[in-house]
Image (spheres, rainbow, N blue to C red):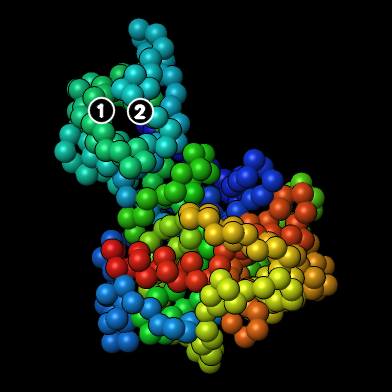
Amino acid sequence: MEQEAKSRPWHGLLSAAAGTAALCLALTLTLAGDRAQAAGPDLPAAAAAAVQGELGDTVIPLGRAVGIKLFSDGVLVVGLSSLDTPQGPASPGRTSGLKAGDVITHMDGSEVDTIEEVQDHLAQHPGEKLTLQVQRGEESLQLSAQAVKTTAGAYQLGVWLRDSMAGIGTMTFYDPDSGVFAALGHGINDVDTARLMPLESGSIMGATVSDVKKGAAGEPGELHGDFDLTADLGTLYANTEQGIFGRLEEAALVQGLQPVEVAGRDQVQTGRATILSNIAGDTVEEYEVEITHLYPENAGDSRDLMLQVTDPRLLEATGGVVQGMSGSPILQNGRLVGAVTHVLVNDPARGYGILAENMLETAAQSLGSA
């Protein structure tokens, strides 16, 4: 159905801060194929506390690149267009009051989570008036729409939709007490609307970094990876502004790794630090950085600190911070202090980070309500 489904190539650049910074996540490809099941896995005995939203006092820093796939709760409106009909141009989606960024959750009382379900509903009710249940931010709306018959003979609303995304990012930590993992340090946003994708289901997959597009001033770099689509390593339960969170199912990812304390805000200081990152194959290495600035606490913002890459190996290989490194753990004085989140577009050697204590708190809160 023309213009009902919108597929986009890899971009990897999600603008932020008036174009001065970019999220370090290469994750903007619409998925095709079967949808993941919403049901979560059985929790191990060690994760009993996590059901109550409780995480441990220490976590295991990771820095491992993984493939990430996310399926939306409802379908996201990413654009509205005009349609050619025998009577002339028509824009039924726009006329109904739909806006880019809206999430359509129901049509005539029936839940819709995929583009195919929207297409099927229109095909079964050609030209009929439809009732759309729409989520617009925190507001729930009920809109009336009526598809029109195009010159090609199909009934359409003139709405471009997205129901899934996939790409590569970095795992930040694993909590052995609950089985919970955290990644990215920021949310997964739709590339067209910059809205946080509502999570219905999702998972992480094994990945190897095949090559790196080196960053340069005005042109952020990017990790390129190959995914293992044969098995999921864990399932997601939350997509938030402070990162994505889930339950790990593959113990091999953390085998032999030791937990460390999570630093409180008052324990983080400017000066020398390191990051763990996976920029080649599946090998995680530690690189020297310097925390150059700490920002005042600002609720909802994932930019708590600024760092500069000083390690000549990383500068030579990547130019500094590149997309796909989102979630790389930041370590200082034997503690996990944060995760890399953004790269400065005009200075790829520098980037922003989120405090680890904020990720840990959001992981627990989100798990308690999942």
Residue denoted by label 2: 98
On screen, 329 above or below 258?
Answer: above
- At a point 38% along the width and 85% down the height, the residue shown is 177
- At a point 40% along the width and 75% down the height, the residue shown is 180
**Seen from this angle, which residue lies furthest top?**
87
User: Which sits earlier in the primary sequence, circle 2 or circle 1?
Assistant: 2
Q: Which mark is residue 196?
A: none
Does any portion of residue 341 appear in the rendered image? no
Query: Is 238 positioned to the left or the right of 302 in the image?
Result: left
Q: Position of residue 52 (x, y in %)?
A: 27, 74
Quadrant showing the N terminus = top left
Query: What is the distance, in whole Å, between disc 2 and disc 1 at their CAs?
Result: 8 Å
- At a point 59% along the width and 82% down the height, the residue shown is 335
Q: Position of residue 276 (x, y in %)?
A: 64, 76
Q: Residues within 10 Å of mark 2 (few under 14, many from 20)?
A: many
Residue denoted by label 1: 143
Q: Image quadrant of residue 110? A: top left
Quadrant showing the C terminus = bottom left
Query: Is 263 positioned to the left or the right of 289 in the image?
Result: left
The kind of residue on which mark 2 rests is Leu
Q: Residues within 10 Å of mark 1 (few under 14, many from 20)?
A: some
Q: Secondary structure at mark 1?
A: strand
Does any portion of residue 13 appear in the rendered image? yes
Q: Secondary structure at mark 2?
A: loop
The kind of residue on which mark 1 rests is Leu
Q: Position of residue 280 (x, y in %)?
A: 68, 72
On screen, 63 above or below 4?
Answer: below
The answer to whether mark 2 and mark 1 are in CB contact below 8 A is yes
Q: Image quadrant of residue 51? A: bottom left
Residues 236 and 151: in front is 236
**Seen from this angle, which residue lies furthest bottom?**
256
